[in-house]
Amino acid sequence: MNKVKNYIGQFHPIVWVLLIGTVLTRGSAYMTLPFLSIYLSRHIDLSPIIIGLTVGMSPLMATVGGFIGGHLSDRFGRRPIMLTALFVLAFVYYGFTVANSQGWFILLNAINGLCTSFFEPTSQALMADLTDKKIRMKVYSLRYTAMNIGASVGPLLGAYLANHSAKLSFAITGSTYFAYGIVLFILMKKLIITKQSETKKVVSFVDAFKIIKTDKALRYLLFGIILINIGYVQIDSNLPQFLEGTVENGVTIFSVLLTINAVMVVCLQMPISHFAEKFSLMQAMAGGSLFIAAGLLGFSFINGWVSAIISMVLLTIGEILIFPSNSMMMDKLAPEQLRGTYFGAGQFRKIGNFLGPIFGGFLLSHLHGQFMFWIISILTLGSIIFFTAGNRSYIKAKISTLEKTV
């Protein structure tokens, strides 16, 4: 019992609220957004192109919005940015329940992507603000676990509601965000958090952009994680098409693989992250790249259940290693007064989520699926080059800073 109390006591109460909120909001969002295209095709007379544009507006706005939101949180404080984003998200989902035209859905989903990209890097920065450096890796691992708990439960509820009352799912999601905002508002007021802009040097947007632009280590890290995302996003985009066309019961196998992936992340995130702490961040990220590349390569040789499961296990181990380590590396690179800006800049990694399905789909349609996974696997391995270069740049910059202070 004391061990449990000590473990809980390591982290600020607001960190625990953010983790619980991540489970609830992720679960609610995954209950609605994956089924938005189905809702639009059933209830609004839209062409597939317009539906694709509507669904794509959220990640598109998230790509550009993260940097802006992160910088605003550094300048004006975490609290106003996070609370504004949560309450606007609540009304976005309430808006979905009454929207009846393509214009409204496009606008609402664009605002959804923008507010999500404001909230996520700001919440990561706040977690880092409130957590000792020695245990921040644990926080990032817990956050990733929380995201996957929500992502594994949400679609199951969403599939049921999509066939019974899609508008109810939007209302539930909106209410979840609203309640989350109320709880955070009360706690942030009760547990006083000093406004960052009052205690740290304020950096203008232009100056922040210049710092980001000249940070070689950050650029290399972003290029590397974009390559990782190009590979990882094949799970949702092109793997199901490949399985359906090459393996008997391909759709069934794919659904089981998704379950294995979610269960592994939830159950093994903390043990594997604890083991990875024995190594440097660079080694953990390189190891993650190798496992993800091995999993993608394994998909090209799938001929049944066993090979499919082994491939997914390899890829999931890589996922567990690399994504929390990427957050920790971003934390290490960020100057104290620009932590939100750096986490916001990390949203540019979603370029990989945008390019991955297009590039993989092109290869799948022009080459055999096996060759597609070979090429994507090699591309993913290329991330190690960028991670290594970024690590070297970070060490050089650190040495240079130390020399200047001596």
Image (cartoon, grey):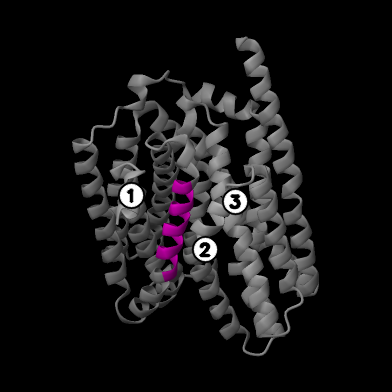
Query: Magenta stretch containing residue 146, yes or no?
Result: yes
Q: Look at the image and tell me in which quarter the C terminus lies.
A: top right
Is 250 or 401 nearer to us in this picture? Answer: 401
Instruction: Give the SS element for disc 1.
Output: helix
SS of the residue at dot 2? helix
Query: Which residue is found at the position 67% from the left and 61% from the top?
Result: 292
- At horizontal 68% and vertical 18% (from top left) the residue drawn is 400
Q: Main secondary structure of the magenta part?
A: helix
Q: Amino acid at mark 3?
A: Ala
Residue located at (69% from left, 83% from top) = 245
Left or right: 63, with 215 as reference point? left
Q: Is residue 90 left or right of residue 47?
A: left
Q: The N terminus is located in which quarter? A: bottom left
**Image side of residue 389 versus residue 229, left or right:** right
Q: Which residue is mark 3?
A: 276
- Label number found at residue 8: 1
| Residue 385: percent from left, percent from top | 76, 44
Label 1 packing within 10 angstroms: few (<14), some (14-19), many (20+): few
The magenta stretch spans residue 369: no
